[in-house]
Amino acid sequence: GENNEKCKIKSAKLYLSFAIDELKEKTEQKENQTEVKEKTQEEVQSQISTTPQNQTSSLSTSDIDTKIILWYSTDHGKTWNSFAKITTLPLSNSLNNGYISFDAPFIKDWQDIENLRVMLEGVIGGEEKISAFLDGMWIGVEAIGKLREEIPKKRRQIEKNIRPDKNAKHSCKIKDFHINPLTKGHEATTELLLSGNLSGKQIIEIGSLPVGIDVLFQKNNDYIYTPVEGENRIALNIVIYPDAQKGNFSIPIIYKSGNSTTVCQLNINNSE
């Protein structure tokens, strides 16, 4: 998917959760009252053989014991290729001591996963009948690379009636008034500078933010920060995520000391 486009698939496996003819075997065991040695995982895996990826023809005489053929398509079912076969029954998660898995070297990228179709074909002939129960099928992938960071799902929106105190004895300003994180790999750090009366209870809060742009206090990784008495330099982390809203934005920073409130602003450029 789009979020994984920077990752490269190293290997893939196809997992099946199913049972074939397991109930039949258990019934026969009960009727005959004979003990059947539990198959080890190695014995069960020996019942599965992988066929060449490009095999598209019907079974040859050497495949007479084949019970089920597994096919794949990475073009929405337009062309099919066999990649594995099951030759001996019964077979199940229980007998295998785990889910049945097959290497999937035909999955080379994320588009292959999106387009993948898998088909199980039974090739039992004559009067023989089998019972098959498919509970689930999924793909396990080992990938190399770093996932793209997702845009925050919620936009920070502050709805407060802020009335700055014209006679406030405290103030704030941004060390770097204008920030362009695009020149710094979509991330930047700046400082909020406090001045004036720094005593008493103080609270600083980041105001509303555009979609895909985050501004957090570095010390607590939050939008609200309570400085200690005498603290006058507070670090801010700024992140612009992929596909964030474009434009030049003025971010309000609300600084409250006691009952008095003042506001300063941080300008962020994401117009490129």
Image (tube, rainbow, N blue to C red):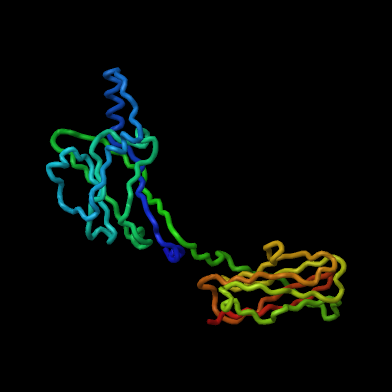
Residue shown at 60% from the left, 73% from the top? 210
Q: Nearer the viewer, residue 192 or 207?
A: 192
Q: Is residue 44 left or right of residue 176?
A: left
Task: Examine the image and state in which quarter residue 198 appears.
Answer: bottom right
User: How many numbered markers are drawn?
Assistant: 0
Residue 157, image x and y in percent?
Answer: 64, 69
* Residue closer to the observer: 53 or 137: 53
Residue shown at 81%/67% (left/top)?
202
Depth check, front residue: 31 or 113: 113
Q: Is residue 227 above or below residue 39?
A: below
Whole-percent x and y of residue 24?
A: 27, 29
Vertical placement of residue 210 versus 272, above or below: above
Q: At x 39% / y 38%, what residue is drawn?
A: 98
Residue 211 visible at all: no
In the displayed structure, 170 sits above or below 201; it is below
Residue 117 image offset from top left, x and y in percent: 30, 55
Residue 172 in view here: yes
Q: Quadrant of residue 27?
A: top left
**Where is residue 20 drawn, in percent x and y?**
29, 36
Q: Quadrant of the N terminus?
A: bottom left
Left or right of 167? Residue 163 is left
